[in-house]
Image: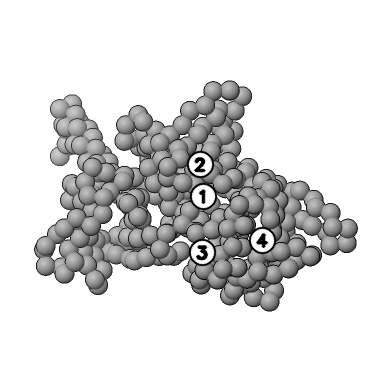
Amino acid sequence: MPIYINNYTIMNQRFYLTLVLVFAGIISILAQTTALVPYEGGYFVKNGEKWSEYRPAHKTGLWSEYKQYREDDTFFYVKNKKCRLAIPKLGKDKIFIDRNKNGKWEVVYNTIDVHHQCSEQAGLFYCYNDGRGREHNGYYVRGDNGTWREYAPGKLRGVWADFKQTGENCDYFIVESTKNIVYIPKKPELNFIIKPIGNTSSGGYTTKAIYDRSSAYDYNFNYEYHGTLTRKNKKYTAKGKGARISFDNKCNVQVAFDGKHYDYLYASVEIASLDGKTAVLITIDEDNKIWLLEGNARVDCKAICKNAYFLGGDSKEFAKIKELLALGTFRM
C-alpha cells in the first residue's frame, strides 16, 4: 500500500527539525564546557565537570580542585572533600560557600567577571573591561616563548588575536600583533594601552584583574636590555629589550627575558663581591647563581644560558636590598 506525504506533513517535519536544532544549540550554550571566573584574590577555571582554583599571590601552582555536581540558570555547583561552592554564571552575582555541606550558604568571594570560554588551564591571566558592555570584556594569557593570546568570549569562540612580546619594563609587558601594539599592565592600578600600528592615536582598556605570580614578588628588578658578556674581553653584546629578576622572602626567585620566565627556589641571599664590585648574590645551587649589581645583573644559570647579562636597572632597588642585608633585616 503506497504512502502519500502531503505538503503539510513535510512542513511539519521541517518545523520539528528546526526546533530540535535550536534546542540543541541552547543546550550547548547552557552546558558550558569551559569557563574562567576571576574573583578578588584568585580565579576558577572550568574544564567539563572539573574545576580548578588558583591564588597566584599565595601559591605558584594549583590551590584546590572541585567536581561539578549540578547547575541551574544562575550558578554552577561544585564540591570537594572540604566544602561546596556556588559559582555564578553572571559577574553581578557573588560566589557562595557551604563550609560544612549542611545547606548554610554564605558569601565567600566577590566575583570580578565570568567568561564562558577558557581553553587555557593554569594560565597567567590579565583581564580587562573595554567599556562597551560585559559581552566585550576579555582577557590576555601570557604563554611561553614570548607568546600572548587574547580572548573575547562574548565576541568570538576561540582566540581573538595572537601577540608576540617585544619588550618589558617595570610597569608593562609590550606585545605586538599584525594590527596593534599593546601595553599590558603588571599592576592592577594601571590600565591597558593600545596603539594601532601606523596610527599615532591610542586607546585602552580598564584593568579588571591580574593573575601572575611575578606581580606578587616583594622585590622586582627590571632592566632595559639583556644580552651576553664575554669573559675574555669583558664586552657586552645586546640581544633584546626588557628583562626582570624577582624574588621574595620565601625562597622563590623568577628570571624573565625574551618573553620566557624561569622559576627557582634559592638557598641564600647575601652580599658578595663580583669583579671587584659589591653585589647581592642569590644562590640557587652550585651551578646556578644570580648576581645583582648597581643597575646591572649577571645570571649564571645552566638551565637558561651562561653569562646572561641585564643592563639598565634601577639603582634604588639595588640600594634597598643591599641595605636590608647589611642591617640583617632581610629574612628568609
Taking the image as drawn, is residue 258 in sight?
no
Q: Are marks 1 and 2 in contact (CB under 8 Å)?
A: yes
- Residue 51 at what x, y percent from top left? 32, 60
Rounded to the nearest angstrom, the CA distance separating label 4 from label 1 is 26 Å
Q: Are marks 2 and 4 in contact (CB under 8 Å)?
A: no
Q: Residues within 10 Å of mark 2 (few under 14, many from 20)?
A: many
Task: Give the number of the disc on residue 292.
Answer: 4
> Disc 3 marks which amino acid?
Asp
Q: Nearer the viewer, residue 138 or 116?
A: 138
Q: Earlier in the sequence, mark 2 or mark 4?
A: 2
Q: Nearer the viewer, mark 1 or mark 2?
A: 2
Task: Give the number of the disc on residue 248.
Answer: 3
Task: Give the number of the disc on residue 72.
Answer: none
What residue does disc 2 label?
A: 184
> Disc 1 marks which amino acid?
Arg
Rounded to the nearest angstrom, the CA distance separating label 3 from label 1 is 21 Å
Q: Earlier in the sequence, mark 3 or mark 1?
A: 1
Q: Residues within 10 Å of mark 4 (few under 14, many from 20)?
A: many
> Disc 4 marks which amino acid?
Leu
Residue lying at the far right in this picture: please name it: 233
Image quarter of the N terminus: top left
Residue lying at the far left in this picture: please name it: 103
Query: Is disc 3 placed on a helix, strand or loop?
Result: loop
Q: Nearer the viewer, residue 198 or 328?
A: 328
> Disc 2 marks which amino acid?
Ile
At a point 35% along the width and 55% down the height, the residue shown is 41
Rounded to the nearest angstrom, the CA distance separating label 2 from label 4 is 26 Å
Rounded to the nearest angstrom, the CA distance separating label 1 from label 2 is 10 Å
In the image, residue 35 above or below residue 150? below
Query: Is disc 1 placed on a helix, strand or loop?
Result: strand
